[in-house]
Structures are given as C-alpha cells and as structure tokens.
Image (cartoon, rainbow, N blue to C red):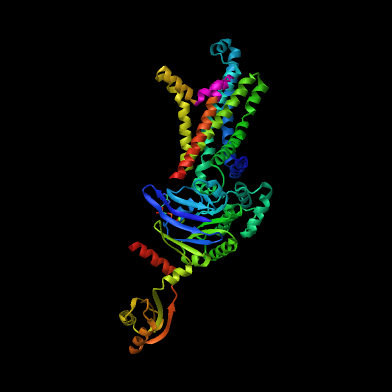
C-alpha cells in the first residue's frame, strides 16, 4: 500500500467534488433539510415548555422537558435520515462514472493498487461528508447557549454520526462499483440503506433469537444508543465491520470485472 | 521487449482473440492491423494488464503481464481507443496526477509535466480544463499521459481514430518524433498508417493472426499478380470485353471517364507480360491508347487479399 497514491487519488476526487459543485449542492440541501428539522424540533419543544409552565401536569404526563430527550436525540435521528438520502448522491459517481467514461481503464493500468484507489475515493467522499456534518454544529451550540443540555450525549451522538457516515459511504462505493450507471448505483445504495434501517421494525414478528440477530444487524439501533450517550464497543465494532466489509466487497467487485 | 505466445481471450463462449503469437524488439514500432472486431483492443488490454488472458503468455519488458502486472504497468504508457480523460480536470493537474501515480518523484513532477506538455505540443492549453479542448488536443493529452513517466513501451490503440486529416498528420508526426528508443505497439484499421509509421506489421482478423512481416515484404510477397492501369479511348464495354479475353488477365475493372477516354485496371497472373499482350489487341482494334502504367501493390491490397484468403480458408 502506497500512501502517496492514496493521497493522489484523494486529491483528485476532492477537487472533482468541489470543482463540479456537486459537493456544494449536496451540502446546501443537507443544511436546509437539517436546519428545517432542527427548528421544528425546537419550536415544538418551546411550545411544550410554555404549556408545561402553564400546567405542570403536562410536564409530568409527558416527561418531555428534558432538552436531550426532546431535541438532541430526535435531531440525531433526523440528521441520520437526511444523511441516508444525501450520501448516496455523493458516492454514486465515485466508481460508476470512471467506468462509464472509460477513465477506469487507464486508472487500472497505472501502477496503482485497487485498494489505493478505493481508499483514496473513500477518504475524498468522507471529507465532503465531514464538511457537511460540521455544518450542523451550530444547532447543538445554540442549544448549549439557550439551555443546559447534557454535553456527553451530544459528543457521542456526533461520534455515532461520523461512524454512520463511514458505513454509508462504504456501501455507496460498493454499489457504485457494481454498475456504470450512477442513478442505479445511487438508488441501489438508498434501497440497501433503507433495508438496514427498517429491519428493526420486523423484530416483533419473528422468534426472539432471530429478532436479536435482526436488531443487531439494523443500523439505526446502533446509532440510538450512541445518541443516548451510551458508548458500547459493540456499536463501534458494528460500524467498523460494516465499513470494512463493504470496502472489501468493492475490491472483490473490481477484481471480478477484470476476469470477465 | 514484448513476447506474446498463443494468447487467447474468451468473452463467455465467444473468443475475442484466438492463439495470437508475435514479438517486438526493443525500439521497434509494430503496427497492429485489422478491421473492427479483429481483437486489437483485446490484445492491448492484455498487454497493459487491464485484464488477464484466458490462456497463453504475454511478457512485457521482461515481466509476465499476469504474474508481475505491477512491474509491467510501471514500464508502459497506454492510450486506450476512446481516449478517456477526466473532463473536469485542468490539463496540468491531470498530468501531474498521472505523473504522481506513475511514480515520478514529487519534486520532479512539475518539471516533468512541463517537459511532456512541450513535447506533445500542449503549451497552448496550459491551465485549460480538458473538457474544453478540441479532439486533436485531447488526443495529445492522451499521448502526454502515456508518455509522462518516460516509459520504455508505448501501447497506442487507434491513436488517429476520429481525427480530421490535418490532426491525423500531426499525431502521426508526433508519434514518429516521440518514438526514439521506445518500443511502440500501435493499432489501426487504416492501412496506409502502418506503412507510414511502422517497421513491422501484425495483421489480425477475427481474433486470429494472419501474418507478421515488414510492410515492404508483404507487398513484395504479394506480387504474384501485377496490375496495369490503362486509359483507352473507345467503347467501354467493348474494350472491357476484349481485355478480359486476353490470356493471363484475371480481372478487369473499368471506369467511364469524360470524352470517351475510359480508365481500366487490369489484373494479370504472375508471369504474364501484360504490356506485350495488351498492346496488339489495342492496335488491332484501332483504339487510342492514352496511358499505360504498372500499379504498385499497396498495403491496402495486401490487407484485403490476406483477409479474404483467411475467410475462404
Ligand atoms: N467486453 C467485451 N465483452 C464481450 N465481447 C467483447 C468485449 N470486448 C470485445 N469483445 C468482442 O471481441 C472481439 C474483438 O474485439 P476488439 O478487441 O474490441 O476488436 P478491435 O479492437 O480490433 O476492434 C469482437 O468480436 C468484440 O465483439
Ligand atoms: Mg478496438
């Protein structure tokens, strides 16, 4: 593995993201969507707070006056849904486009290893994602300014989102390696991500043992505990394995193309 | 430099190439000639380690393309048929990227890029995005990326395809200039290109090797027939018929021309003296002979002949 090659592929793809305005467009939509969702949460929280002031029974009834419970945790849930919809837009072109335009043929005949290409591209996309996620940092800062939320769940929640992003991007690169068509790559990764997301709803219909397996596989279950401030190595391992697994499958997919 | 032995590539049940064998010495320019679908691109993709052969052996610069593909890839420059480039990248950045991944030292990248751009006639497009360039300039950028690591071996897949006549001339000139000590494998389906640029020609058709030889030899070997060009004033059909009846004439092609002065190409069997047998016929018929000369067998004829022979075999 040659770090310089990874760096060169990384630099090329970061430039391509920011040169073609894809990155700006995706970040802008992401900011608009998360901003809208955040202010909705905030508004309903303040309405509830006023009601609670007027009538302490409401507060007792709903136990909703904790900022972490009413705003922070749902915020992380909302951000992760927007990520699920937006990250495939960033990943879909990474390999599909190179295959379609034929540049892949040149790239694979340069003295570069497939793994260097895949990791360089992963990091380039991750960089755009980091910029995207950092744009949301003003929301918790605003909360800290206005009230007194617990800080630890905010930090672990962000850690969870950073891990979640890596998993999404890895899957997106994998689907992008399967086809020359960006749209197919994008839709496929959104579908697979939804599948991993919605899986947890079926736990109640199956046997307990099977249900446990499903809830371990479901991606959102692992984010939820981090958003609560609970750091469980099991969750971290889940995201790491998810990411590494799909990067590995991407390499296999590139290799199998050579044999056809 | 390049050794190819019994190379076969199957796409499913269909054979892209079937038992190709040839070699190229250091410094040689080899022309790969064949119609579309002959297997030129397939062979080149194996040589450049884009994909492995199904069977057979390909050794480039002393390394096996399959077992030591990394070493091979360090030593080649490749220009694929479609000239794939990153359209949103600036020429200089693109070449710097390629130089980097091809192992040019960081410190030397800038200088290497400048030199290569100069060599390839790209000085006028410094700082321009590749997508904005004309086809001719894109072809030069394609050549530049192949050359940027100063490779021992250049593999160019139809480098003049899709260019206008002036650009074709320029690119051919550039290739000849850049050849130097390099071994070049160049594919084409344009026949004159081979005799212009290449020292040896490998003709393939439908995945099979037809012949490997020097362009000159091919022409000489095929002189088992000779052709004469004639311009005769008189009735076209009558003349054509009479010429066709002469002993030793295999074929007559006739073209009507202005003021009754028709053109004929007569193909004679080897050994038959065309001039000696045609002249009396013309004289006895009282036709006016305006011109008579031998037609050099062109590589084009060689090609058509070889390919049709292969077909009927
Ligand atoms: N990726 C592919 N899948 C299936 N068949 C292919 C593929 N590439 C080429 N072929 C077939 O292999 C043969 C040789 O093609 P190619 O090497 O591209 O010829 P050329 O470059 O001489 O035009 C053709 O019959 C073509 O249809
Ligand atoms: Mg071809």
Examine the image and state in which quarter residue A53 appears: top right
Measured from the top left, where is residue B126 in percent x and y?
65, 55
- Name the magenta segment's main secondary structure: helix
What's the residue at 56%, 36% (across, down)? A29
- The answer to whether residue A47 shows anywhere in this view is no
Horizontal side, residue A69 vs residue B256: left or right = right
Q: Position of residue A71 (x, y in %)?
A: 58, 22
Please tell me which residue lies in front, B275 or A218. B275
In the rendering, at what x and y percent does residue B162 appear?
50, 60
Residue B142 visible, this angle: yes
Taking the magenta stretch, the answer to whether it contains residue A233 is yes
Side of B39 where A134 appears, left or right: right
Decide which of A16, B272 is in the foreground and name it.
Answer: B272
User: Does A180 sit above or below residue B125?
Assistant: above
Instruction: Inspect the magenta stretch and tell me whether residue A249 lies in it.
Output: no
Exactly how many numbered labels are in the figure? 0
Quadrant housing the C terminus of chain B: bottom left
Above or below B33: residue B229: below
Q: Is residue B311 left or right of residue B181?
A: left
Quarter of the image where one finds residue B169: bottom right
Give the vertical position of B257 relative to A184 (above or below): below
Pick whichever, B109 or A189, lies toward us.
B109
- Residue B283, x across and y down, in percent: 36, 89
Residue range in magenta is: A219-236
Outermost residue, front side = B62
Of B312 and A80, the residue lying toward us? B312
Q: In the image, is residue B300 above or below residue A237?
A: below
């Amino acid at each position: 593995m040659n770090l310089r090659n990874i760096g060169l592929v990384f630099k090329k793809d970061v430039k391509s993201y920011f040169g073609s305005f894809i990155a700006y467009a995706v970040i802008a939509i992401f900011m608009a969507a998360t901003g809208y969702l955040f202010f909705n949460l905030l508004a309903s929280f303040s309405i509830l707070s006023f009601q609670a002031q007027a009538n302490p029974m409401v507060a007792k009834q709903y136990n909703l006056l904790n900022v972490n419970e009413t705003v922070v945790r749902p915020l992380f849930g909302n951000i992760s849904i927007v990520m699920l919809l937006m990250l495939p837009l960033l990943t879909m072109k990474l390999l599909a486009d190179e295959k379609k335009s034929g540049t892949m043929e040149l790239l694979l005949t340069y003295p570069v290893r497939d793994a260097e290409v895949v990791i360089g591209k992963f990091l380039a996309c991750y960089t755009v994602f980091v910029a995207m996620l950092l744009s949301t940092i003003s929301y918790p800062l605003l909360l800290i300014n206005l009230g007194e939320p617990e800080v630890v769940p905010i930090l672990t929640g962000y850690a969870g989102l950073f891990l979640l992003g890596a998993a999404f991007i890895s899957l997106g690169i994998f689907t992008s390696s399967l086809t020359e068509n960006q749209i197919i790559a994008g839709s496929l990764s959104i579908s697979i991500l939804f599948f991993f997301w919605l899986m947890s709803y079926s736990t109640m219909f199956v046997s307990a043992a099977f249900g446990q397996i499903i809830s371990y596989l479901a991606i959102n279950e692992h984010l939820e505990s981090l958003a609560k401030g609970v750091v469980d190595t099991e969750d971290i391992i889940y995201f790491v394995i998810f990411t590494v697994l799909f990067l590995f499958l991407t390499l296999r997919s590139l290799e199998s193309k050579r044999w056809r | 430099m390049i050794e190819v032995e019994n190379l076969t590539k199957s796409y499913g049940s269909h054979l892209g190439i079937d038992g190709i064998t040839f070699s190229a010495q250091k410094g040689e320019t080899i022309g790969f000639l064949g119609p579309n679908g002959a297997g030129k691109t397939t062979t080149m993709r194996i040589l450049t380690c884009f994909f492995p052969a199904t069977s057979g052996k390909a050794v480039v610069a002393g390394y096996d393309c399959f077992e030591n593909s990394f070493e091979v890839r360090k030593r080649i420059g490749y220009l694929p048929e479609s000239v794939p480039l990153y359209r949103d990248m600036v020429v200089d950045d693109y070449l710097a990227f390629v130089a980097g991944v091809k192992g040019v030292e960081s410190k030397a990248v800038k200088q290497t890029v400048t030199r290569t751009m100069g060599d390839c006639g790209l000085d006028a497009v410094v700082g321009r995005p590749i997508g904005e360039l004309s086809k001719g300039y894109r072809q030069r950028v394609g050549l530049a990326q192949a050359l940027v690591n100063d490779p021992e071996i250049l593999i160019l897949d139809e480098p003049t395809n899709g260019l206008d006549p002036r650009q074709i001339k320029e690119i051919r000139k550039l290739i000849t200039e850049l050849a130097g000590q390099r071994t070049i494998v160049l594919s084409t389906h344009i026949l004159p290109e081979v005799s212009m640029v290449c020292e040896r020609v490998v003709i393939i058709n439908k995945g099979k090797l037809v012949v490997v030889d020097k362009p000159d030899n091919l022409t000489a070997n095929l002189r088992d027939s000779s052709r004469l060009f004639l311009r005769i004033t008189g009735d076209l059909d009558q003349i054509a018929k009479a010429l066709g009846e002469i002993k030793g004439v295999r074929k007559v092609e006739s073209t009507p021309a202005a003021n009754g002065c028709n053109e004929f190409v007569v193909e004679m069997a080897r050994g038959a003296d065309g001039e000696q047998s045609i002249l009396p016929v013309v004289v006895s018929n009282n036709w006016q002979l305006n011109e008579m000369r031998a037609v050099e067998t062109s590589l084009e004829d060689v090609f058509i002949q070889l390919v049709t022979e292969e077909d009927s075999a």
